[in-house]
């Protein structure tokens, strides 16, 4: 395969509809073949249904530390959004490239892939790792099996750059994500008997408790500067239960999330929630019925916070590459926290495009942002040359 410009490459990547609910295998296969055409083999780490995969490839020597470039291959759905042009066919208008994933985050992957020949032709003193994941947009669930492989490497990379859209600013810290499903089990009865265990009522008490807990965190001092908002958020996004007015509901579920701040106890909110269930909800149910009533809680996603490692070599490196003197924090979660906390690889987020253009109709990345990312990668190549 010939050397592609990042724009041509992005055009090809956008054409694969890798909405998280669909398979990303065709895109992974395309990247694998592209790398193979330069003699680079890839490790394909499939999910249990073999419908999705992560890809890990390495360029250069393997027995020394190195740098990892990471991005997710999935994109958010376009359903219900009003696009001016076909979302999976990239269009250029006024220096902007429109299409689903142009900004979040195939633009970064396109820049990286277009630079692969330069890294191959250079005499690298340390390896360049390429790590592309699936199911990031559904709670960073796909990357875990990739991080397991990273954990088995003889020498781990000294830095991981996650190319989420930060307008090429250096982001060294982000909030975590805890996404939970609470299932409240009651017992049905004719409403007139007052003998049922009302799952909707108990679920409502849980929602009220979470709202009160949010208020407590809103007021808590000290607030952590830089985050918007500067406190942990707790939010109920969905509640569903009950059938009709005259049947006591036997089931209700609540889907909720909270976003802890790095440097605080990430499990505190969950523990407080558990105490409330054990201390208030279950005893209330027991009073009503010795037989019925229960609460089960499942984690749907758990994304650790990204801790700032101010002054670390990974951070200094990325500031140098991005030609930035300052670092920033963001409220959204990324895979960087997982690379750092689970994989032990210092991670920094920096990539082309703005988060303001992500996840919407007419998502775009500015061509100037891709140019800036290419210069960033050129400087990386200079750092890695023997
Ligand atoms: Zn993203």
Image: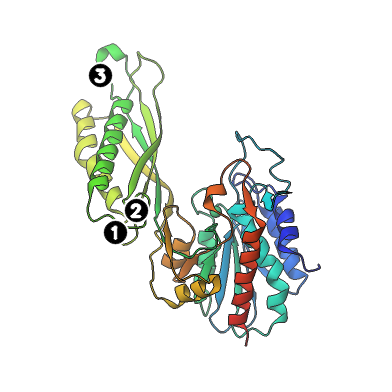
Question: Does residue 254 appear anywhere in the picture?
Answer: yes
The Cα atoms of the two marked residues, 2 and 3, are separated by: 40 Å
From this view, report whether residue 385 is shown above or below residue 359: below
Label 3 sits on a secondary structure element that is loop
Of the pair 336 and 290, the residue shown nearer to us = 336
Quadrant assignment for the N terminus: bottom right
Residue depth check, mark 3 versus mark 1: number of the one nearer the observer: 1
Query: Label for residue 260?
Result: 2
Residue sitting at x 23%, y 56%: 222
* Residue 13 coordinates in the image, percent (x, y): 70, 55
Count of numbered labels shown in the rendering: 3
Left or right of 137 on screen, residue 29: right
Residue sitting at x 43%, y 66%: 327
Of the pair 236 and 49, the residue shown nearer to us = 236
Residue sitting at x 27%, y 54%: 223
The Cα atoms of the two marked residues, 1 and 2, are separated by: 7 Å
Asked if the residues shown at circle 3 and circle 1 are in contact, with their CB atoms under 8 angstroms apart, the answer is no
Mark 1 crowd level (few <14, some 14–19, many ≥20, 10 Å Cα): few
* Residue 145 coordinates in the image, percent (x, y): 53, 61
Asked if the residues shown at circle 1 and circle 2 are in contact, with their CB atoms under 8 angstroms apart, the answer is yes
Location of mark 1 (residue): 264
Location of mark 3 (residue): 195
* Residue 358 coordinates in the image, percent (x, y): 56, 48
Q: Earlier in the sequence, mark 2 or mark 3?
A: 3
Label 2 sits on a secondary structure element that is loop
Farthest residue in the top direction?
192
Figure quarter occupied by ligand 1: bottom right
Query: Label for residue 305?
Result: none
């Amino acid at each position: 395969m010939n050397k592609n410009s990042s724009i041509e490459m992005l055009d090809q990547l956008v054409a694969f509809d890798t909405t998280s609910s669909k398979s990303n295998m065709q895109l992974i296969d395309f990247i694998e073949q592209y790398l193979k055409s330069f003699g680079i083999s890839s490790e394909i780490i499939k999910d249990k249904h073999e419908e999705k995969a992560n890809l890990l490839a390495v360029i250069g020597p393997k027995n020394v530390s190195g740098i990892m470039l990471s991005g997710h291959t999935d994109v958010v759905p376009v359903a219900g959004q009003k696009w001016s042009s076909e979302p999976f066919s990239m269009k250029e208008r006024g220096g902007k490239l429109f299409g689903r994933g142009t900004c979040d985050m195939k633009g970064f992957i396109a820049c990286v892939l277009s630079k692969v020949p330069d890294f191959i032709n250079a005499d690298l003193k340390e390896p360049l790792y390429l790590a592309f994941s699936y199911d990031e947009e559904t709670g960073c669930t796909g990357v875990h099996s990739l991080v397991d492989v990273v954990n088995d490497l003889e020498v781990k990379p000294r830095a991981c750059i996650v190319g989420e859209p930060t307008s090429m600013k250096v982001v060294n810290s982000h909030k975590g994500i805890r996404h939970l499903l609470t299932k409240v089990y009651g017992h049905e009865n004719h409403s007139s008997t007052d003998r049922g265990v009302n799952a909707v009522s108990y679920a409502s008490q849980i929602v009220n408790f979470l709202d009160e807990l949010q208020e407590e965190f809103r007021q808590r001092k000290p607030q952590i500067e830089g985050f918007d908002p500067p406190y942990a958020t707790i939010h109920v996004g969905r509640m569903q239960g009950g059938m009709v007015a005259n049947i006591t509901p036997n089931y209700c579920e609540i889907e909720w999330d909270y976003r802890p701040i790095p440097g605080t106890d990430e499990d505190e909110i969950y523990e407080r929630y558990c105490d409330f269930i054990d201390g208030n909800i279950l005893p209330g149910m027991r009073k009503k019925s010795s037989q019925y009533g229960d609460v089960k809680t499942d984690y749907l996603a758990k994304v650790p916070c990204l801790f700032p490692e101010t002054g670390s070599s990974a951070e200094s490196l990325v500031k140098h590459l991005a030609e930035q003197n300052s670092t920033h924090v963001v409220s959204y979660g990324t895979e960087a926290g997982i690379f750092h906390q689970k994989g032990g690889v210092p991670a920094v987020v920096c990539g082309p495009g703005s988060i303001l253009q992500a996840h919407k109709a007419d998502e775009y990345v500015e061509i100037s942002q891709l140019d800036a990312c290419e210069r960033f990668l050129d400087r990386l190549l200079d750092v890695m040359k023997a």
